[in-house]
Image: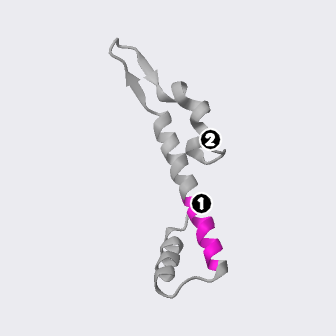
Amino acid sequence: MINLERINELARKSKTVGLTEAEKEEQALLRAEYIAAVRRNLRAQLDNIDIQEADGTVTSLKEKYGEKHHDKFTGDGQES
């Protein structure tokens, strides 16, 4: 689980007294974990959206964009 309290604590400390090297590394790791979680959540939301086309057909975003764009939103792969 992402510890937002710790992320905010480190952000406040960095603005006031500064961070040690260990705290900077922790902050970078926590931020990366947070961003990955946000991307996973966004991907899950997008996967559940269906669009009704003008002709009445329904297109699932998961089927249309699913796996080929999956890595960009989850942080599992490298963006090109």
Tag 1 secondary structure: helix
- Identify which residue is drawn at 61% across, 43% down: 79
**Residue 21 place in picture, x, y as percent:** 66, 80
Residue 22 appears in which quarter of the rendering? bottom right
**Residue 59 place in picture, x, y as percent:** 45, 21
Q: Earlier in the sequence, mark 1 or mark 2?
A: 1
**Residue 23 place in picture, x, y as percent:** 62, 78
Tag 2 secondary structure: loop
- Identify which residue is drawn at 48% across, 45% down: 42
Residue type at tag 1: Ala
Mainly helix, strand or loop, the magenta region?
helix
Residue 28 appears in which quarter of the rendering? bottom right
Does residue 26 belong to the magenta stretch? yes
Image quadrant where one finds the N terminus: bottom right
Residue type at tag 2: Ser
**Residue indicated by mark 1:** 32
Q: Is residue 43 left or right of residue 57?
A: right
Where are the magenta residues, as a range? Answer: 23-34
**Residue indicated by mark 2:** 80
Mark closer to the observer (1, 2): 2
49 relative to 5, above or below = above
For label 1, count other residues whose C-alpha is less than 10 Å away and answer few (under 14), some (14-19) or many (20+): few
29 relative to 42, above or below = below
**Residue 5 place in picture, x, y as percent:** 49, 73
Q: Is residue 26 left or right of residue 18?
A: right
Distance from the alpha carbon under mark 1 to that under mark 2: 18 Å
Give yes or no for contact between labels 1 and 2 (Cβ–Cβ under 8 Å). no
For label 2, count other residues whose C-alpha is less than 10 Å away and answer few (under 14), some (14-19) or many (20+): few
42 vs 27, nearest the viewer: 27
77 relative to 13, above or below = above
